[in-house]
Amino acid sequence: MCGIMGVVAKNQVNQLLYDGLLVLQHRGQDAAGIATAEGATFHMHKGPGLVRDVFEQDDMETLRGNIGIGHVRYPTAGSDSLSEVQPFYVNAPYGICLGHNGNLTNATELAQVMAREDRRHLNTHSDSEVLLNVFASELQRVGTPRATPGDIFAACNAVYRRCRGAYAVVALIIGHGVL
């Protein structure tokens, strides 16, 4: 079980995300991560341990922006490797960060399809990274320089068709917002 959250505000969201993750800490005490967006730039910090141990003042100051997502992890799939601490990030298309809670029951099959057909390289054994890459692949099929909200929701529908299991997701898409 993991905890996920997203925040959009008029001011900086780093402290709101930190405070929210502290409240969600009971959902996962293995690792924590925050990603924020400042214009077209992502800022991210993540690591193993409790929220209060992962984020120091210097880390918080680098997490600039008025939009962001957070994740606290309790591993139920994949491994307890540092490489599986979320949020995960892909740069194409548009730049997407994703936090995930749940399990994909067809993650192994999807990972093979991602490599073979969608030409996507996965760095971990995490079903969360698989889910992110399925979404990114579906969004990339749009093929336009700027996706519309309709394009994003069509990509979500394709994810629902392809990904089996039970899960909740929060995503941050540069230039669009939180999904």
Image: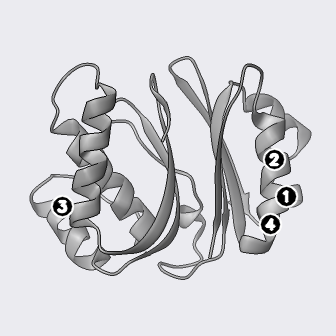
Spot occupied by residue 35 in the image (x, y as percentages of width and height): 62, 41
Label 2 sits on residue: 18
Label 3 sits on residue: 115
Q: Amino acid at mark 4?
A: Gln
Label 1 sits on residue: 22
Tell me the CA gap for discs 4 and 2. Answer: 10 Å
Q: Secondary structure at mark 1?
A: helix
Query: In the picture, residue 122 is in which quadrant?
Result: bottom left
User: Which quadrant does the N terminus fall into?
Assistant: bottom right
Of callouts 2 and 3, the N-terminal one: 2
Tell me the CA gap for discs 2 and 3. Answer: 35 Å
Tell me the CA gap for discs 1 and 4. Answer: 5 Å
- Would you call the spot at circle 4 few (<14 residues within 10 Å), some (14-19), or many (20 or more)? many
Of callouts 4 and 2, the N-terminal one: 2
- Would you call the spot at circle 2 few (<14 residues within 10 Å), some (14-19), or many (20 or more)? many
Q: Which mark is residue 25?
A: 4
Spot occupied by residue 92 in the image (x, y as percentages of width and height): 31, 36
Q: Secondary structure at mark 4?
A: helix
